[in-house]
């Protein structure tokens, strides 16, 4: 591998016109054994996760633990406020009961789970990100419009300036560009 | 190929032609056209109607804030409240607005879980409608507390008296339900906006637009590794919003149902309130969408079919509401409680008979016009019916609240509520706030979910010939 190239450049970007073309390219790159690569699309393409070999997203764990935290927080808060710290008898009802506390805990479960989901998604995606080499490229701006891009990073152990370019050409891309870091 | 098709092929030598789904975007528009058209609403020169509409809305909104200032500086006596009618237009408006919000969440979450792809054209603006309706709703309980500077006692914050809120009260459950609803709706709406803000960022012509949209887009690059987590998060948020939306109006109904007042103390309230909320919300969605699609030239994305389908939802939920009205009366009679029966007789034939029959006309009779396809497809008639739904649902809440309160247990304390000009102007002003926020929204944010609409076109399907499938067949 050429040391100069790997320092200055981010990766090879190949442009495709349809999701079908990008998906076939993705399957061939997956089968070639690349690791640091991605497909960028204007909308989620059905079946692309399988074509890329991406496993099921773990966001659900964040949601689950967020929800559990919300429910527990609610129960503890209400017990502390109405049953422990300042006891007020209302209508002869018990000072604390999980039944009257339930509606509030139900809402807090959802509130905390929703925050955890969004934060978890951002964490897993390493977002927000203020700078990305791809976003400097003028042609890449069409990724949010109507074009599909396959990106293979130069940091990938399998990357080779000639072979990788050839692989993307074989996959049917008519525009391949080396993007700087 | 399925077994049935193989058998057909073996016996007749041919297979039937595959039926194409009716497209959700008309005229086979390209992916690029979709972002150009939707983003164009925010990018092109302001249409002529925008400033007049904004100025009128803004003036009406200002009227509300003037009324609120007058209310706070003088006291709740400026409203028509009396003893026994301690809740009237304030809580009616609150329940009315919070109900409107429910259609937005239903469209964005429930229809998403049910894989109703037509939702993509309307979910963004319906969610925005939810947020603005919740904002309008939130004002009324805040200002009805009398000493508004103590409204923060509703929240579990330490105060100088070291007393905490009392969680056995459904009114406090409501505080949590509504604030959670507003917050989660905002998170859901924003999550949906991220890819579209990236579209706006990449199209931006000026530095400041690029910076601001870019800030909201969080550095989105459309990476499929990101989409994978994003889609899962979106699904989970939809899954969380569904029980949330059902609980919010259930808890709003607990404000009444958990009390002992005849006419309020009924077990049917939670499902009846939820159905009514969705009914009223779809009414408001149609009231907004029909002008929006024409004025912003979005007829090819928000099609007649979309309006027609929403008409069907109104018909279904309107029928549930009609059933609930009937069932309330049945139980009032069958339950054998003379006070309950008296309350309901009074509701239909007492001093407020006119409001009850306005409600029945608007909510029970008009939605049944939607049995006819010709009517569901006529934009003018649908628009008029949607206004009727809005009026009817406001009166429903008025009927429930005021007719139940105005005749208390003691005939000596019976009364009658009439609104003052402050009541009326505050309510009308809340429409000003709603319209102002909505007009700003359609000017600065994509009013339709660009990436989601692209996703439901045939050219987005990698297994469709327009999406680049080899051989052009589904698999």
Image (tube, rainbow, N blue to C red):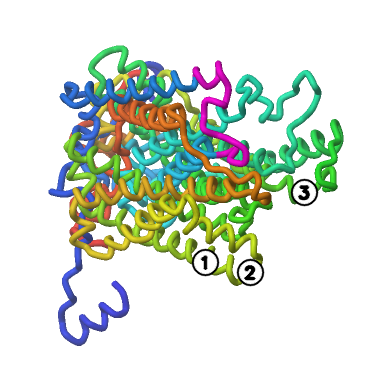
Give the extent of the magenta segment: B69-87
Name the mark on residue A98. Answer: 3
Residue at 52 percent of width and 66 percent of height: B327
At which x and y percent is residue A56?
50, 48
The image quadrant that residue B149 belongs to is top right
* Camera sees residue A28: no
Residue placed most toward the observer, B54 or A38: B54
Chain of the residue where label 1 is placed in the rendered structure = B
Spot the residue most to the front. B412
Q: Which is in the foreground here, disc 1 or disc 2?
A: 2
Subunit ID for the residue under disc 3: A
Q: Position of residue A100 (x, y in %)?
A: 74, 48
Would residue B91 be visible to someone looking at this image? yes
Nearer-the-camera pick, B246 or B16: B246
Query: SS at mark 1?
Result: helix
Measure the C-alpha gap from mark 1 to mark 2.
Answer: 11 Å
Please indicate whether residue B72 sits to the left or right of residue B208 in the image: right
Which of the two discs, 3 and 1, sits closer to the camera? 1
Q: Residue furthest bottom?
A: B11
* Residue B89: numbered disc: none
Q: Is residue A29 above or below residue B350?
A: above
* Residue placed under numbered mark 2 in the picture: B335
Q: Which mark is residue B327?
A: 1
Q: Position of residue B90 (x, y in %)?
A: 52, 35
Distance (Cα) linking label 3 and label 1: 32 Å
**In the image, residue A74 lies at what x, y percent?**
72, 39
Residue shown at 21%/40% (left/top)? B293
Few, some or many residues within 10 Å of mark 2 (<14, 14–19, 20+): few
The 10 Å Cα crowd at callout 1, few under 14, some 14 to 19, many 20 or more, is some
- Quadrant where the C terminus of chain B sits is bottom left
Q: As drawn, which residue projects farthest toward the top?
A: B207
């Amino acid at each position: 591998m050429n040391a100069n190239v790997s320092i200055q450049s981010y990766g090879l970007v190949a442009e495709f016109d349809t999701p079908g073309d990008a998906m076939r390219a993705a399957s061939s790159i997956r089968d070639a054994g690349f690791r640091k690569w991605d497909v960028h699309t204007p909308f989620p393409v059905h079946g692309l996760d399988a074509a890329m070999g991406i496993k099921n997203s773990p966001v659900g764990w964040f949601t689950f633990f967020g929800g559990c935290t919300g429910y527990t927080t609610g129960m503890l808060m209400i017990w502390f406020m109405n049953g422990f710290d300042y006891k007020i008898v209302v209508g002869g009802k018990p000072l604390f009961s999980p039944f009257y506390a339930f509606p509030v805990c139900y809402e807090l479960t959802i509130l905390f789970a929703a925050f955890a989901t969004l934060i978890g998604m951002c964490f897993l995606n390493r977002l927000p990100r203020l700078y990305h080499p791809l976003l400097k490229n003028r042609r890449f701006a069409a990724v949010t419009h109507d074009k599909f891009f396959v990106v293979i990073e130069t940091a990938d152990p399998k990357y080779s300036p000639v072979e990788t370019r050839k692989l993307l050409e074989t996959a049917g891309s008519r525009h391949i560009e080396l993007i700087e870091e | 190929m399925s077994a049935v098709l193989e058998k057909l092929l073996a016996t007749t030598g041919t297979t039937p032609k595959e039926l194409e789904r009716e497209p959700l975007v008309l005229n086979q528009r390209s992916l690029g056209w979709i972002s150009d058209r939707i983003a164009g609403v925010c990018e092109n020169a302001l249409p002529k109607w925008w400033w007049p509409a904004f100025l009128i809305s803004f003036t009406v909104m200002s009227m509300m804030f003037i009324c609120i200032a007058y209310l706070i500086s003088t006291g709740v006596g400026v409203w028509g409240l009396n003893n026994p009618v301690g809740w009237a237009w304030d809580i009616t408006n609150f329940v009315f607005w919070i109900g409107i919000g429910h259609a937005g969440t239903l469209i964005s979450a429930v229809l998403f879980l049910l894989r109703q792809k037509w939702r993509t054209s309307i979910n963004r603006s319906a969610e925005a409608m939810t947020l603005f309706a919740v904002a309008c709703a939130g004002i009324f309980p805040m200002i009805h507390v009398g000493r508004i500077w103590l409204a923060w006692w509703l929240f579990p914050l330490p105060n100088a008296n070291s007393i905490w809120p009392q969680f056995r009260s459904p009114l406090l459950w409501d505080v949590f339900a509504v604030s959670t609803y507003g917050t989660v709706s905002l998170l859901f709406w924003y999550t949906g906006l991220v890819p579209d803000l990236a579209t706006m960022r990449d199209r931006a012509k000026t530095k400041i637009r690029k910076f601001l949209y870019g800030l909201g887009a969080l550095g989105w690059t459309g990476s499929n590794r990101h989409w994978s987590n994003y889609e899962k998060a979106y699904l989970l948020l939809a899954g969380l919003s569904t029980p949330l939306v059902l609980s919010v109006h259930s808890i709003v109904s607990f404000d009444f149902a958990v009390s002992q007042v005849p006419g309020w103390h009924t077990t049917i309230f939670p499902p009846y309130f939820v159905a009514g909320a969705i009914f009223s919300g779809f009414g408001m969605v149609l009231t907004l969408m029909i002008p929006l699609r024409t004025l912003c030239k979005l007829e090819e994305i928000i099609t007649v079919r979309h309006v027609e389908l929403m008409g069907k939802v109104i018909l279904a939920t309107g029928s549930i509401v009609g059933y609930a009205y009937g069932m309330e009366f049945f139980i009032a009679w069958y339950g054998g409680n003379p006070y309950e029966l008296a309350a309901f007789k009074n509701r239909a034939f007492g001093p407020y008979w006119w409001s009850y029959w306005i409600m029945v006309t608007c909510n029970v009779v008009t939605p049944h016009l939607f049995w006819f396809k010709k009517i569901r497809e006529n934009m003018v008639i649908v628009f008029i019916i949607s206004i009727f739904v809005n009026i009817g649902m406001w009166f429903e809440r008025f009927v429930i609240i005021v007719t139940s309160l105005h005749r208390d247990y003691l005939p000596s304390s019976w009364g009658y509520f009439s609104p003052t000009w402050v009541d009326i102007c505050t309510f009308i002003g809340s429409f000003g706030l709603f319209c102002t926020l909505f007009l700003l929204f359609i000017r600065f944010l994509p009013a339709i979910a660009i990436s989601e609409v692209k996703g439901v076109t045939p050219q987005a399907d990698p297994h469709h010939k327009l999406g680049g499938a080899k051989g052009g067949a589904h698999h």
